[in-house]
Image: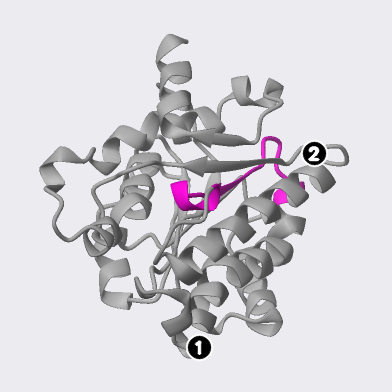
Amino acid sequence: MKIDLVNKTILITGSSDGIGKMLAIELSKLGANIILLGRNQKKLNNVYDQLNTSTSLQKHLIIETDLNTLNNITADEMFIAINQEFNDIDGLIHNAAILGTMTPLRDYDMSIWNQVIQTNLTAPFLLTKALLPMLATSSLPRIIFTSSGVANIGKSFWGAYSVSKFGLKGLAEIFADELESTSPIKVFNFDPGPTRTNMRASAYPAEDPNKVKPTFELLNCYLWFFSKESIESNENYFEFSDLSKKVNST
């Protein structure tokens, strides 16, 4: 799928690895300005060096921050820093997440629980809330939350991660209900399914990674979210298996 992202500005959380890194590099090739958000400066610099800068108007930005410590004040400071470089934001992709521990709830460590809920659920809420003014001025604004199979059915040992994804699904639905009738902002929640990432390897250490799809196979799904076709969609929640069929049939 090919779309024009020239002059579009897209912020991607967790953009130093995996899906976020792939999206940053590939969307920049389509002309987008990329805001890289992550907590590892060295990795962010590495991705930054791979971003396309072939158009004279194209520019990118690194924001080094740990979502585990994000609060109202630091989120507002982030808004100010971004607003100094860009007039608006056309896309906000909530990709960053941490797994926590795979253990029964009765044994779950409270400090790890808090970190997972903060990073996976509270931080996306704070970041979205802070950046809404810049999204509202875009002509085709998109907010994309990243879901998971454990956001729909409670599964043993997935603990705080599963709870955070249940919560994120609800958060996306509420934002969609509040925003889509009053603004041009479209909100989507996307479950990429099994994908070859470091998190997947941690959750399934015995799995052969070569039997899991690479991150690049997700690209057309994300491009569809930024297409004009998605404006007419009455659906907000998509799974890779269904959306990829939809994208490939158009």
Q: Amino acid under label 2?
A: Glu
Residue hosting label 1: 110
Residue 84 appears at what percent x and percent y?
Answer: 63, 67
The residue that appears at 33% across and 76% down in the rendered structure is 40
In the rendered image, residue 139 lying in the magenta stretch gets the answer yes
Q: Is residue 181 above or below residue 1?
A: below
The residue that appears at 69% across and 56% down in the rendered structure is 171
- Label at residue 180: 2
Instruction: Using a 10 Å C-alpha cutoff, classify the residue at mark 2 as few (fewer than 14 neighbours), some (14 to 19) or many (20 or more).
Output: few
- Label at residue 215: none
Of residues 2 and 95, the one drawn nearer to the viewer in this rendering = 95
Q: 14 left or right of 194?
A: right
The residue that appears at 47% across and 10% down in the rendered structure is 250
Asked if labels 1 and 2 touch by Cβ distance under 8 angstroms, the answer is no
Q: Is residue 219 above or below residue 245?
A: below
Q: Amino acid under label 1?
A: Met
Q: Is residue 33 above or below residue 116?
A: above
Q: 203 left or right of 161?
A: left
Outermost residue toward the right in this view: 182
- The reply to whether residue 247 is in sight is yes
The residue that appears at 65% across and 36% down in the rendered structure is 236
Q: How many marks?
A: 2
Identify the image quadrant of residue 125: bottom right
**What element does badge 1 sit on?**
helix
Q: From which residue to which does the magenta span run?
A: 135-152
